[in-house]
Amino acid sequence: MGKVVNFEEMIEKFKGEWLLVEYEDLDEELKLKRGKVLFHSPYKSEVYKQLMEMRGGNITIEYAGDIPKDLAVLFKVS
């Protein structure tokens, strides 16, 4: 970890896991193109625990796999 890679490489390496990524580049729709994987886990809660310890930076949480169509994601910023 710590190396800048494209999102496709992240998906290949961490298939089925949640990723905490410091992004380097986003596309025009703000989708991740490239970045550094800071932490990964099959458990979303573990990624959120790591996120709570971070301050600042260009951070995104991504899932390296197919997200079920019946899943909704909601974020609260405080």
Image: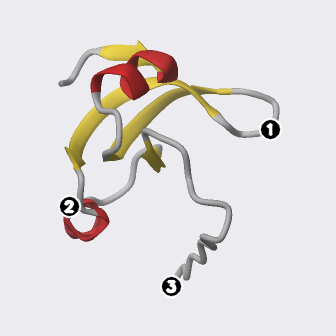
Which label sits on residue 74?
Answer: none
- Tell me where residue 16 appears, x and y as whole percent: 35, 43
Tell me whether the residue at label 2 lies in contact with that at label 3, contact meaning CB atoms closer than 8 angstroms.
no
Q: Nearer the viewer, mark 1 or mark 3?
A: 1
Residue 53 falls left or right of residue 21? left
Q: Nearer the viewer, mark 2 or mark 3?
A: 2
Task: Give the alpha-carbon distance from disc 2 to disc 1, as whole Å.
Answer: 26 Å
Residue displayed at 45% across by 47% down: 63
SS label for mark 1: loop
Dot 1 or dot 3: first in sequence order is 1
Looking at the image, is 56 positioned above or below residue 40? below
- Tell me where residue 52 appears, x and y as whole percent: 26, 70
SS label for mark 3: loop
Which label sits on residue 29?
Answer: 1
Q: Which residue was labeled with disc 3?
A: 78
- Tell me where residue 64 appears, x and y as whole percent: 43, 39
- Tell me where residue 8 appears, x and y as whole percent: 49, 19
Identify which residue, 50 or 62, lies in the foreground: 62
- Farthest residue in the right direction? 28
Residue displayed at 46% across by 47% down: 62
